[in-house]
Amino acid sequence: MKIASRFLTRPDTAAAVHLTVDGEPLTAWPGDTIAAALLAHSGDASRRSARGAPRTAFCMMGVCFDCLIEVDGRPNVQGCMIAVRDGMAVRRQRGLRNLSGGGQDA
């Protein structure tokens, strides 16, 4: 018995969105969030905790904050709440970040 997918299918005519993750090219689709694009691409962690533990999107609705990433130089962005756009530069966070948006804490 064939079970219909519960996921939305994409129209073949949708134009791809091109962004970079840690300098590597990634192709996503309009309407995808950054977290969804990362999970669909590799499933790798989107950040590392202060103790080095891998973390990635869990709730996909902005509650857990496990999907924090750096977008276009701005740290602590919730990847599950931001839609991808062409030319976006995403970096995985490693360790703690300053609240003011500076680099890593000492």
Image: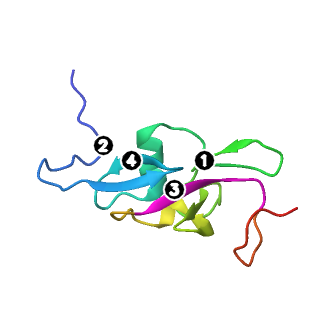
Structural distance between the alpha carbons of marks 3 and 2: 16 Å
Label number found at residue 6: 2
Let me know if residue 11 is in the magenta part: no
Structural distance between the alpha carbons of marks 4 and 1: 17 Å
**Earlier residue among tags 4 and 1:** 4
Q: Nearer the viewer, mark 1 or mark 3?
A: 1
**Earlier residue among tags 3 and 4:** 4
**Earlier residue among tags 2 and 1:** 2
What residue sits right under mark 1 in the picture?
56
Structural distance between the alpha carbons of marks 1 and 3: 10 Å
Q: Could you classify mark 4 by the number of other residues whose Cα lies within 10 Å: few (under 14), some (14-19), or many (20 or more)? A: some
Q: Could you classify mark 1 by the number of other residues whose Cα lies within 10 Å: few (under 14), some (14-19), or many (20 or more)? A: many
What residue sits right under mark 3 in the picture?
60
**Earlier residue among tags 3 and 2:** 2
Asked if disc 2 and disc 1 are in contact, CB closer than 8 Å, the reply is no
Query: Image quadrant for the C terminus?
Result: bottom right
Instruction: Check disc 4 and report its element: helix, strand or loop.
Output: strand
Pick the front one: 24 or 68: 24
Label number found at residue 26: 4
Structural distance between the alpha carbons of marks 4 and 2: 25 Å
Asked if disc 3 and disc 4 are in contact, CB closer than 8 Å, the reply is no
Per the rendered image, the range of residues in magenta is 88-96
Q: Nearer the viewer, mark 4 or mark 1?
A: 4
**Which residue type carries mark 4?**
Leu
State the residue lying farthest toward the right.
106
**Which residue type carries mark 2?**
Arg
On the image, the x and y values in percent for residue 82 come to 46, 67
